[in-house]
Amino acid sequence: MGSSRPTLTGTDYTSPDVYDREIDRIFRGGWACIGHQSGFGPRSRRVLEVAGERIIVTGDEEGRIHALANVCRHRGSELCDPTDPTIVGGDPGPKSIRCPYHAWTYSLDGSLVATPRVDEGDIDLAANGLHRYPIEVVNGLVFVSLGRPTMTLDAWLDRYSPDAAAWLRGAEFDFTGLHLERRTATRVAANWKIIVENYLECLHCPVVHPELVDVIPLYRTGRATDPDRDDGAVALTPGANSFSADGQADLPLLPGFDADNENLYVGHHVFPNLFVDVTSTSCIVTVLFPDGAGNTMALGDYLFAPEAPDQPDFDPDTVIDFSELVGHQDYDVCERVQRGVRSATFDHGILTAKDREVATFDTHYRQALEPVDWAARPQ
Ligand code: FES
Ligand SMILES: [Fe+2]
């Protein structure tokens, strides 16, 4: 007898009611990643649509990052239109945010600075800044809560992603100064959990990723992790140093890598919506923004060593092209799963022993959806 157990149900992937509960409990009651900090540089702004909420993320004059409601305090007009999600470094525009309706104007930290034609003294500027979402940065990765979180980010990470959190906070890798070269955006017609579950298992790798299993031979076995290692890393094919078609890239090593570990790959999922994939020459940060039960926007940040762009023959494309190929192979099968689980015949699927990490995610997901004691939330 095996150790199989059921997956989430078809309803969990398709129901608008379940989706609404996820938004409430996970994205408003908890924390989600919105990308690497270098995407939100000084004097920049981006409008992101995260779990149905359009938010403005700014870098102010001092380089502090703010997550602001995209809603004018005057009469509720939406302030900014969505920005092209692939813009790197934000959309350097005016140093203020001006409402298109009556021109109330806010600074990049959300403070209300002008209310044209309103009688002087009529409005308390200091009391009417934009709503600010809680925001935290961990090793260069930016997390927001779209509501009032039920716990601190640290507690959230420890509860739902203990191994990844220890790795993120550890001194081994410093992601803060990495160079953001490119950002990609892919609209996937699949529930966000299907994309997470796909990331957490490798039974599909030999079938779906013929190129990837050449670079990471362990994946031919269907294992996502190496049972002979306790650091979560996986060896690339001998002599390889990168996530690229032939495993080779002429790129400087990231901080924390040297000749002893340049052959390794480390990947982590951070609950709910972040993947971090690191080789010695690149760091790929992927964030998932759910958009209804059946759609997800996947943003990929491609980061390289701080000095990489100064290299005269800097060529990030071998890494980016390969990762996008693998990513689209994944997204295609995720869309296929979404179409399948819509069937009335699908009550649930089967998790095998090698799907252990999927099972852990499903357990955490169910815990996170449990009713929240709103009255006990920290103010
Ligand atoms: S609604 Fe924004 S200024 Fe009036
Ligand atoms: Fe995959």
Image (tube, rainbow, N blue to C red):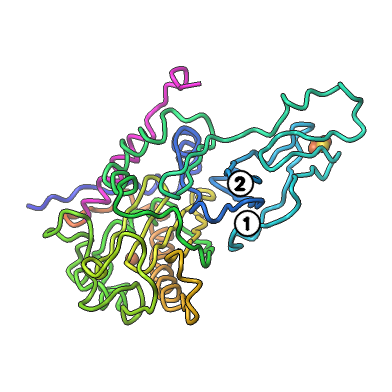
Q: Residue at x 32, y 72 (%)?
A: 208
* Residue type indicated by callout 1: Gly
Q: Is mark 1 within 8 Å of ligand 1?
A: no
Question: Which numbered circle lies on residue 22?
Answer: none
| Main SS, magenta residues | helix
Tag 2 residue: 57
* Residue type indicated by callout 2: Val
Q: CA distance from mark 2 to mark 1?
A: 9 Å
Around disc 2, counting alpha carbons within 10 Å, would you say few (fewer than 14), some (14 to 19), or many (20 or more)? many
- Residues shaded magenta: 355-379
Quarter assignment of residue 194: bottom left
- Report helix, strand or loop for mark 2: strand
Tag 1 residue: 90
Q: Residue at x 53, y 55 (%)?
A: 38
Residue ranking furthest to the top: 375
Q: Is mark 2 within 8 Å of ligand 1?
A: no
2 and 1 marks in contact (CB < 8 Å): yes
